[in-house]
Amino acid sequence: MEGKPRILIVFYSMYGHLFKLAQAFVEGVQEAGGEPILKQVAELVPEEFWNEGVRKSKDLMKEVPIADPRKALKEIDGLIVGTPTRFGNMCAQMRNFWDQTGGDWAEGTLIGKPAAVFTGTGTQHGGQETTIITTMLTLIHHGCILVGLPYSFPEQSRMDEITGGSPYGVSTIAGPDGSRMPSENELSMAKGLGKRLTTIAGKLST
């Protein structure tokens, strides 16, 4: 393989929780010798309905480019998708992005490319696993090779604190009021999965 594996990290974040996880994924990709491409999907909620928390978060993410569904998936070696839970599924903003990728599906752009998923919920069991798994269904249709978080990552087995993380992927728990940001343990899993996916992408691209 020539050059670094190019890994797209595409996410949606309303209050900044998944943005912080995405930044940890960026670190992991870089540590594994990859080139991270960080992008967010387009917002669908009109600005007039944003509260102060959303406005503050959007301001922090204003430098992150919006992913163009017609171009974002091209010329990448791997993919990491971040979506909050909406009733056990990906959010509408992320669904809107994928629903515009029919051209890449027809061309087989992502066939054989490794892909991972991360998510966040308000409560410990608020749909983290179902959101990751249902998002993976879309990735399977695109021909991706799914990359999870094996138990070689001991962070997901901790019992001394509340934490996200499962064999399916990285997750965080925001709390009912959204005040809890990703913990160091959750960020460690994101960084580790970013390194794992990048290493796999490099091997698949040789």
Image: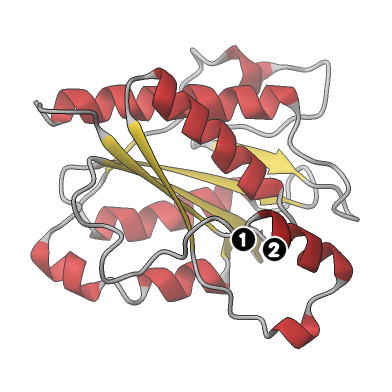
Tell me which residue sits at (55%, 42%) in the image.
22
Badge 2 marks a residue whose secondary structure is helix
Distance between mark 2 and mark 1 Cα atoms: 6 Å
Q: Residue 151 at x, y = what percent? A: 51, 17
Task: Tell me the kind of residue under disc 2.
Answer: Lys
Q: Is residue 74 above or below residue 159?
A: below
10 Å crowding of disc 1: few (<14), some (14-19), many (20+):
few
Task: Tell me the kind of residue under disc 1.
Answer: Lys
Q: Is residue 62 above or below residue 161?
A: below
Tell me which residue sits at (22%, 40%) in the image.
77
Q: Residue 157 at x, y = what percent? A: 66, 18
State the quadrant of the N terminus: top left
Tell me which residue sits at (66%, 41%) in the image.
20
State the quadrant of the C terminus: top left
Report which residue position mark 1 lands on. 62
Q: Quadrant of residue 80?
A: top left
Q: Are marks 2 and 1 in contact (CB under 8 Å)?
A: yes
In this picture, residue 116 sits left or right of residue 173 = left
Report which residue position mark 2 lands on. 58
Q: Quadrant of residue 45?
A: bottom right
Which colour assignment does the render follow? secondary structure
